Image: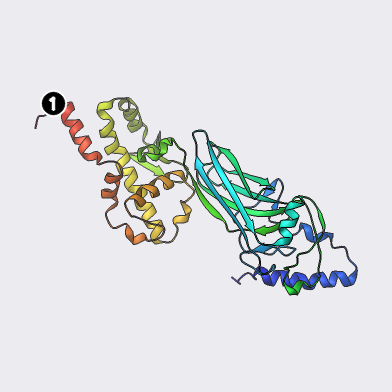
Amino acid sequence: MAASPSPKCYNRAYSARLSFRKESGLSLTWCSKILCTVLWGYTVMQINPRAYPHPVLAHWGDDILDSTFQGVVSGKGAKNAYVFDAVFKTNNADLLTLVEQKKAMYAVHVECNSTRYRNLFKSAAEKFSFEIGAGLIDGRVEVCSFVLAAKPIDKYTNASFHPDYGKSIFRLSRGDTLAVAHDQIIEATKKNDPLRKIGSIFSIVPNDDEKATGMDIETDGPKVIVRLSKPNFESYISLRHSADYRSVLIGSIVVPALVEVLERIRRAADEGELEDYSDFRWFVVIDRKLRERNIRLQEDPESFVDSSLKVAHELLGQPLSLSLNGLRAMTGVDE
């Protein structure tokens, strides 16, 4: 597959097209609607190097010289919401003037793949805060910061345009991108999050397949789904409310399920496919627990030295001892 041209190549090519349209007397209004990344009411995440129909201040290109734009967003979990603080900074005088004139605004786009939440928050202030309900985002959250046109700008120019643009002017529509900052990834962790406990990332359900035996697991959702055959599920239901059998059930169901999950993410790390799990809440919890044990699968897959069985027991607080002690207590066997 051929490599995609760089934004600079695209935009320089646009300069040639612009010259052609000037000479031919054609309208220039078309340029404000092509390849726009962010529009009011419609947003696209994962801002990668790409072409824009007008010069944009971005870290990957040199359409606007000797200029920087930074957007830093930090977040923390409260009881019922996540609170985010956004801080913006640019040294480009023309962009600052547009913001002061209310012709441009700072904006933050937030997207959470696991919950399908996305929204755009905007302000004319260099610092502003916003809240998102605790139930709307969970785990990995992607954040992009921009400067956007707050209203149509008929004659956009910038003293720091690359010389290739000459004295070109551009017609912008409301919502067109003027500057793009680096993407950020924020982990949304509730202040009182029941899923911080490893055992809570599992959901035990019956397997509707009449021929099913034993158990099976699914790892393609926010929780790990453990499917038990109907006879096993009925036995589980009859025992799960008894405190005496809790440790036994953990050892019989949760331990082997966690071992299988650890094996899957180890294989994914070795094959460079760990990103497939990164948006799932169960993975965020396990990854956090592994990091507490200096196991950093994303950066160093070989840091997972011990067996998955040993690590599973450590993550669950050594359930084997609890199970054996529980069985001895139930049977009345003395030491």
27 to 38, vertically: above or below: below
In this view, the residue in front, 199 or 236, is 199
Q: Residue at x 47, y 53 (%)?
A: 276
Q: Position of residue 46 (x, y in %)?
A: 59, 56
Which kind of residue does numbered mark 1 sit on?
A: Gly
116 to 271, vertically: above or below: above
Q: Residue at x 84, y 72 (%)?
A: 20
In this view, the residue in front, 58 or 257, is 58
255 vs 205, left or right, is: left
78 vs 90, left or right, is: left
In this view, the residue in front, 226 or 127, is 127
54 to 232, vertically: above or below: below
Q: Position of residue 77 (x, y in %)?
A: 49, 40
Quarter of image, res 331: top left
Quarter of image, res 322: top left
Residue 305, visible in the rendered structure: yes
Q: Residue at x 35, y 31 (%)?
A: 233
Quadrant of the rendering where the C terminus is positioned: top left
Q: Position of residue 267 (x, y in %)?
A: 38, 57
Toward the left, the furthest residue is 335
**Residue pointed to by mark 1:** 332
Residue 35, visible in the rendered structure: no
Coloration mode: rainbow
